[in-house]
Amino acid sequence: MSEPLPTLPEATRARLRERVERAIPQLHGWTSVDKGARMAELVVAAGSRRSVELGVFGGRGTISLAIGHEARGEGEVLAVDPWERAASLEGENAPENDDWWGRLDHDEIFRSFVQALADTGAGRWCRVLRERSSDAVHRVADGSVDVLHQDSNHSEAISTAEVEEWMPKIAPGGLWIADDTDWATTQRAQARLAELGFDVVEDRVSWKVYRRR
């Protein structure tokens, strides 16, 4: 791994964690309080002007990033997710995953996310793009993203395509948070990040933080 990121003051970290603990446990999704608190810290540590989450679902990750912007008092999170069955089932995924996503009420998850933005106050720091990441990428200028969380479709084809499409959007020194890095289907995307000039700065086994050189 390359040089670690700066450590925030303990009081700042405690405030961010307390805010995340109040905001996300009741929401749909899998981002833990530990991960959410660290994501908020990364927004602050990176001085992020713009953060992006690919694959929002119930909003745990997006709201964690927004809490980082709230602490900074500036910037925005782009919340990118089509909330649609077809997008969830693209590529080759485990049959049990396809079955679960195929039965999910995506519109209801979206409505719960919008409500969570209002309930938590995170909406002030968030812009929602209800579309596929391959479409949303054209709305974003190259080099304008300081922190990105990739948590969308985990198939090899889609996760790798997102790396190719979104890599130019990351500012030099910007951070790419990759989810479920212990899944077989995400290995090619991670290899491509390394090939494109991203170094691992944190390895949490099930998720990693990469920094663009």
Image (cartoon, rainbow, N blue to C red):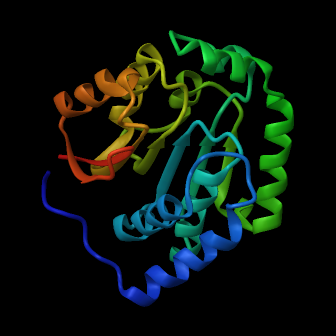
Q: Residue at x 61, y 21 (%)?
A: 97
Residue nearest the viewer, comparing 92 with 59: 92
Can you give x and y, in whole percent of width and height, for residue 31 in the image?
56, 51
The image shows residue 119, relative to residue 129, as above or below, that is: below
The image shows residue 57, relative to residue 4, as above or below, that is: above
Q: Is residue 149 left or right of residue 9?
A: right
Q: Residue at x 79, y 57 (%)?
A: 116
Q: Is residue 21 left or right of residue 148?
A: right
Q: Residue at x 44, y 90 (%)?
A: 11
Can you give x and y, in whole percent of width and height, for residue 5 in the image?
24, 65
Q: Is residue 163 left or right of residue 31?
A: left
Q: Residue at x 47, y 45 (%)?
A: 149
Can you give x and y, in whole percent of width and height, for residue 150 in the image?
47, 38
Could you say which quadrant of the image residue 27 lies in? bottom right
Could you say which quadrant of the image residue 67 lies in? bottom right
Could you say which quadrant of the image residue 153 lies in? top right
The image shows residue 182, relative to residue 148, as above or below, that is: above
Among all residues in the image, which is located at the extreme bottom? 11
Residue nearest the viewer, comparing 44 with 10: 10
